[in-house]
Amino acid sequence: MTERDPVDEHVARWLPVLPDLDPDVEGAVVRMSLLTRHLRAVKDRALAELDLQEKEYGTLHALAGRGGRAAPSDIAADLRMAPASITARVDALVRRGFVRRIPSTVDRRRIDVELTDTGRAYWRRAIGVVGDEEHRVLGALTPDERRLLSDLLRRITLVAERSPAAPSRNVGGPL
């Protein structure tokens, strides 16, 4: 038998109240939520220990994902922000010595943002803590199980990202 966790108790408590509750759906959603919350707390602690704000980390992460150098518009696109919003973030990171502005190699009118060694080191330390915890937690699964979980979550994510269907209306019933 599979070891029980607090979510099993949660589902058992709600089944008599909501008899149509699908225990597998409820269990999966609550567990994903708890895991996300746990990993968020680990990340928040790591950032606090490094005296990094979430938005600073996000900007460093976007830069690192682009090889350590990018146009502010590219950073904004990665962060799904307006390009004008990036200026203040970059200014703060320049003051901390985490990034520098440099002339673009593709357009002399443009300025790129580049990670400094200090910025890269802070980003690596933060991502290392989070990555270590992700590996620890998912280490409960075999490599094949991790791959299966990833594949299943991909399918769920693709459905979630599609526009939801219009809510059905119960004719004659309450709105």
Image (cartoon, rainbow, N blue to C red):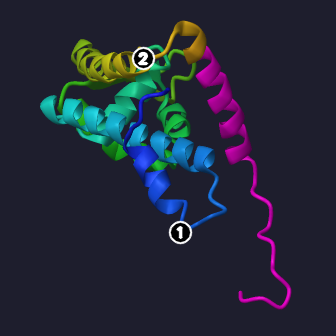
Tag 2 residue: 140
In this rendering, the answer to whether 128 lies above or below 44 is above
Give the residues in magenta.
147-175
- Is 161 left or right of 15, judged from the image as shown? right
Numbered disc total: 2
For disc 2, the neighbor class at 10 Å (few under 14, some 14 to 19, many from 20) is few
Amino acid at dot 1: Val
For disc 1, the neighbor class at 10 Å (few under 14, some 14 to 19, many from 20) is few
160 in magenta: yes
Residue at left 46%, top 49%?
A: 84
Tag 1 residue: 17
Query: Visible in this render: residue 167?
Result: yes
Amino acid at dot 2: Ala
Between 162 and 18, the residue placed more toward the observer is 18
Q: Which mark is residue 78?
A: none
Distance between the Cα atoms at labels 1 and 2? 32 Å
In this rendering, the answer to whether 164 lies above or below 56 is below
SS type, badge 1: loop
- Is 159 left or right of 106, judged from the image as shown? right
60 in magenta: no
Residue at left 75%, top 57%?
A: 164
Quadrant in the picture for residue 69: top left
Task: Single out the residue that lies furthest toward the front.
Answer: 1
Pinpoint residue 134: horizontal percent, then vertical percent. Answer: 38, 22
